[in-house]
Image (cartoon, rainbow, N blue to C red):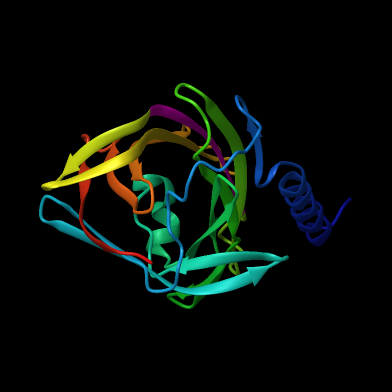
């Protein structure tokens, strides 16, 4: 009979194999020339954006940089623009950063270690391709990511969560007025995520969809959740260089 320790070791090995095969992958459709059409999310330290939505205000700022495997990532103070899709990461204070490769914009969510009520837990980091600025209207991109939440308590399982996503360009080269300011060279795109608890499998996958309007040389100027009764957040101010 295989011991409990061997069973746990086999389970962990299986999870790591799943991540190595499926984590942080993307399969894009449409134009693969990757011709940069312009910088739609300026990334310099101290760049900042403020959004309003009802009584809520969201302040986002780039606070530093980090080199990872030869790529430069720009870290945010917070990035609460994905609705419930990143609720776990936001709740646990995981750090968000952005990497740009020509016209591809990647979001990285960092690993986080927490201790709550004396129980230590760890959530592994992950990355996804959020936006492609060179695609034409109706063109799409897709991908998957995985993260593991492990707890140092025998009564709490190790949880593997899988996210699948699809992005689609809805409009391009438009003008949009937001809170009295006219923005030109705007792209509207939709980003949909499906979050599935692979380990426990006790509830259906959660689907989250949001629309984003992003202006050349400015950044995101408006975003709207299609999941939470259409909550809209709009540009109030920005400071970029």
Query: Magenta span has 164?
Result: yes
Q: Which residues are magenta?
A: 159-171
Query: Magenta span has 138?
Result: no
- Does the image show residue 95? no
Where in the figure is residue 38, as x and y percent of width and height? 48, 46
Where in the figure is residue 44, as x and y percent of width and height? 45, 68
The C terminus lies in which quarter of the figure? bottom left
Tell me if 131 is positioned left or right of 61 in this view: right
User: How many numbered tags mark residues here?
Assistant: 0
Q: Please tell me whether residue 124 is drawn above or below residue 120 in the rendered image.
A: above
Where in the figure is residue 219, as x and y percent of width and height? 36, 52
Which residue lies at the image location 75% right of the left edge and 55% below the top edge?
12
In-front residue for pair 197/68: 68
In-front residue for pair 25/85: 25
Tell me if 62 is positioned left or right of 13 in this view: left
Q: Main secondary structure of the magenta part?
A: strand
Which residue lies at the image location 17% right of the left edge and 40% below the top edge?
177
In-front residue for pair 181/211: 181
Where in the figure is residue 63, as x and y percent of width and height? 42, 74
Which residue lies at the image location 71% right of the left edge and 48% below the top edge?
19
Query: Extreme top residue here?
Result: 138
- Does the image show residue 180? yes
């Amino acid at each position: 009979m295989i011991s409990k320790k061997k069973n746990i070791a086999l389970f962990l090995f299986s999870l790591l194999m799943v991540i190595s095969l499926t984590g942080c992958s993307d399969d894009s459709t449409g134009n693969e020339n990757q011709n940069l059409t312009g910088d739609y999310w300026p990334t310099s330290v101290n760049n900042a954006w403020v959004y309003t939505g009802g009584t809520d205000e969201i302040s986002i700022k780039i606070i530093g940089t980090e080199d990872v495997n030869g790529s430069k990532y720009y870290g945010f103070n917070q990035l609460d623009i994905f609705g419930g899709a990143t609720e776990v990461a936001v709740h646990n204070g995981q750090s968000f950063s952005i990497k740009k490769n020509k016209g591809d914009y990647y979001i990285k969510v960092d690993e986080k270690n927490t201790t709550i009520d004396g129980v230590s837990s760890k959530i592994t980091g992950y990355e996804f391709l959020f936006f492609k600025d060179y695609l034409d209207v109706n063109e799409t991109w897709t991908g998957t990511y995985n993260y593991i939440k492990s707890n140092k308590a025998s009564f709490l399982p190790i949880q593997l969560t899988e996210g699948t996503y699809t992005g689609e360009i809805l409009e391009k080269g438009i003008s949009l007025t937001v809170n009295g300011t006219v923005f030109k060279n705007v792209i509207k795109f939709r980003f949909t995520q499906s979050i599935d608890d692979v380990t426990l499998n006790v509830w259906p996958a959660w689907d989250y969809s949001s629309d984003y309007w992003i202006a050349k040389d400015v950044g995101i100027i408006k975003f709207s959740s299609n999941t939470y009764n259409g909550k809209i957040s709009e540009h109030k101010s920005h400071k970029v260089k």
